[in-house]
Amino acid sequence: MGACASVVGGASPVDAAMLLRIGDICAENLKGIPDAVYTEKNNIVWEMWRKSWHDKVHEVELPTKETLKFDYKEYPENETKVAQAAVQIACANTLKDTVCAVVHEALDGVVHPKFPSNPMSARLMRAAYDKAVEKSAEKAVDKAIEKALAYLKEKGVYTPTDNGEQAAAQEQQTTSTEKPAPVIIKVSKESKPPGLFDKLDLPLAVRKNLKEQEAMMQSSMDRLNRALGHTYHWHADLVEIYKAVGDSDRKERLGEVLFGDYGYLKALADRVESIAADSMTRDAINEAATARQISFTIDNSVTVWNECRFENGLLVMKTASSNFWTNVDQIGNNIEAIL
């Protein structure tokens, strides 16, 4: 916290009211862990499936600094390892977000008034301050993880997997003596990622429409990632969107509306590519979208055709049900105004 305050100087007293707010922040972030784990697990499976198209494996760096390799040919036999990695990553990210939120709660009241009156200078100072908070949180969490692992190793509870090789060797030894070798699932390039759309509680026609737009969806996400210099993921409740849309034709074509050539995600990628060419705007978007996720929701309080908002670290596209799939090309036009 001292490192963050040193950007502009000063410190903030922690009173009883602030402690209550910090407690609320911690409680709220902890409640989001199950959803974060679910999302992270789906992300790993999705990337594993994508890499299989090029006969590659998906590498995931854990908070422990280990790198695990996931091969889609081994799915779902490797699902336990996928889940374990998802838990580690989601919990570490939640802890970092919590530390950042606590630091901001403690220091913003003192730091923000010290920003220069000049808008450009204030923006630069705020960017430096926010980056200092983020870096300090990362260092604090990384140090805590190191201490925890050192303690677990000392107690014999935790042993690194050496990129999964020790675990694989132990599994092979076990399978050779105690049970038959696992069945290796051969995956063709026509295969779909497990559970992405197949198991959604949606009519068959809608699921088929979504599947038809998978390639376009990934293309738009790839463009967003290149433009922003970070890996973003799609995270939205498609079932809730479907239920919230009144027009029967448009809801049946949900995949086209969200991911198609004239859909919201492609339009957002077009807009972000344009404005993120400016490095300050790109950095500002990344600082606001700390969850590195793109979402979409139906919000009938939206009075314009559509808009974007940054909510809980997500970049969220919003529109009212009555305007669903109307003037889609305007999505993202307000991003710079809300940064």
Image: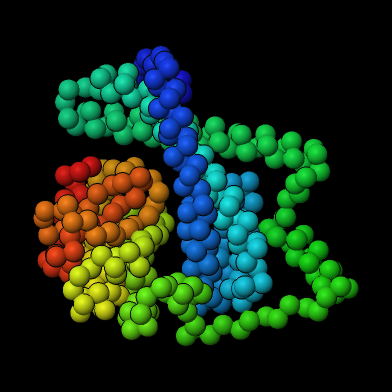
Q: Is residue 106 left or right of residue 53?
A: left
Q: Is residue 203 left or right of residue 35?
A: left
Q: Which quadrant: the C terminus?
A: top left
Q: In this view, does 300 lie to the left or right of 87?
A: left
Name the residue: 17% across, 60% down: 320
Q: Is residue 274 visible?
A: no
Q: In which quarter of the image is residue 143?
A: top right
In the image, 85 versus 34, the foreground residue is 34
Q: Position of residue 118 (x, y in %)?
A: 16, 26
In this rendering, is residue 121 above or below 322? above
In the image, 120 versus 37, the foreground residue is 37
Name the residue: 60% across, 59% down: 83
The residue most toward the right is: 177
In the image, 112 versus 180, the foreground residue is 180
User: What is the total number of numbered labels drawn onto the structure image?
Assistant: 0
Q: Can residue 34 be seen in this view?
A: yes
